[in-house]
Amino acid sequence: MKNVITIDVEDWFHVCGCEPAAVPAPHPKRVRPNVERILGLLAEYDVTATFFVLGSTAEDDPNLVPMIAAAGHEIASHGYSHRLLTRMSPDEFRHELKLTGDIIERQTGRKPAGFRAPQWSLKLTDSWAFEILHEEGYLYDSSLNPLPLVGDGSGPLFPFEIRNGKADMVELPPMVTPTAAGNLPTGGGWGFRFFPLRMIRSTIRRYNHSGAAAILYLHPREMESDGPRLKLPPLRKFATYGPRTEAGGRLRNLLENFRFQTMEQLARSWQSA
């Protein structure tokens, strides 16, 4: 069974709900060196991954996305501004989707097949958003996180088809670890660096034994333990940045012990099954 590694390509200061004034100026850009670290690890193990790229980040560094694509990785959309979908109108969402899609196509020669909303802010009940994704030619979405608070704690764990009239679409949720206390965020973010590695590896095997691919995610900022951070309230700071550890060692361990594919490959194989 092949799993998936995904990277949300955004900078350390892209935090949903924070106004631009909260970002100190001038602020260092940390995306490229951290993406280069990720690309180096993936190349070492001959693994292809999916990079959900923020349109504004791709626009700011026009050589970044071509560098990722040249290494054989899939480029998908993470929107343009990193605004929550809950704060967008349908027209604003379509505009951001088109804008980022055009940037990616211009930089790679290919339209993105997948989308992931910032901070999992797309919900299953948002039929209007899935209709727009369908109309814009997207194959899959990966925004429905089966976690409490940021998603739906009772939502499906494995890939499923969203049936919404004309807007049928493959949904690929990120990995979580089910427990009696609820689902834990072991598949990415702060949880990927906080929970025991043996728990993460065990969860991947449980997914695979169930016939499902485990979808992992990380951000470039997680590749450095001493990178810059916004001044946030303690709880939100931990939820955003997690512990002061870097994800490279854990990523290497998983690359050594599991097999991987891209999100588009998973979506197409799931559709044809």
Image (tube, helix red, strand yellow):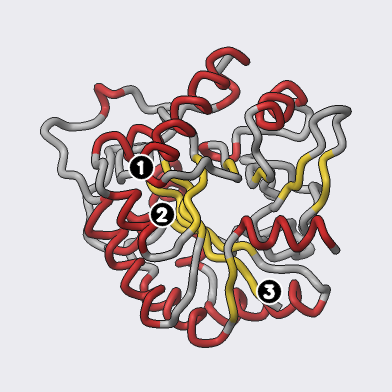
Q: Earlier in the sequence, mark 1 or mark 2?
A: 1
Quadrant of image for the C terminus: bottom right
Q: Looking at the rendering, which quadrant does residue 12 occupy?
A: top left
Q: Which residue bears the numbered disc 2?
A: 219
* Residue 199 shown left or right of residue 44 in the figure: right
Residue at 53% from the left image edge and 39% from the top image edge: 119
Which mark identifies residue 72?
none
Q: Earlier in the sequence, mark 2 or mark 3?
A: 3
Q: Amino acid at mark 1?
A: Gln
- Is label 2 or label 3 in front? 2
- Is label 3 or label 1 in front? 1
Q: Is residue 21 above or below residue 232?
A: above
Helix, strand or loop at mark 1: helix
Residue at 78% from the left image edge and 59% from the top image edge: 158
Q: How many other residues sit within 10 Å of disc 3, few (<14), some (14-19) or many (≥20)?
A: some
Q: Is residue 86 above or below residue 265?
A: above
Which mark identifies residue 203?
3
Which mark identifies residue 107?
1
Q: Position of residue 248 (x, y in %)?
A: 36, 72
Residue at 34% from the left image edge and 32% from the top image edge: 56
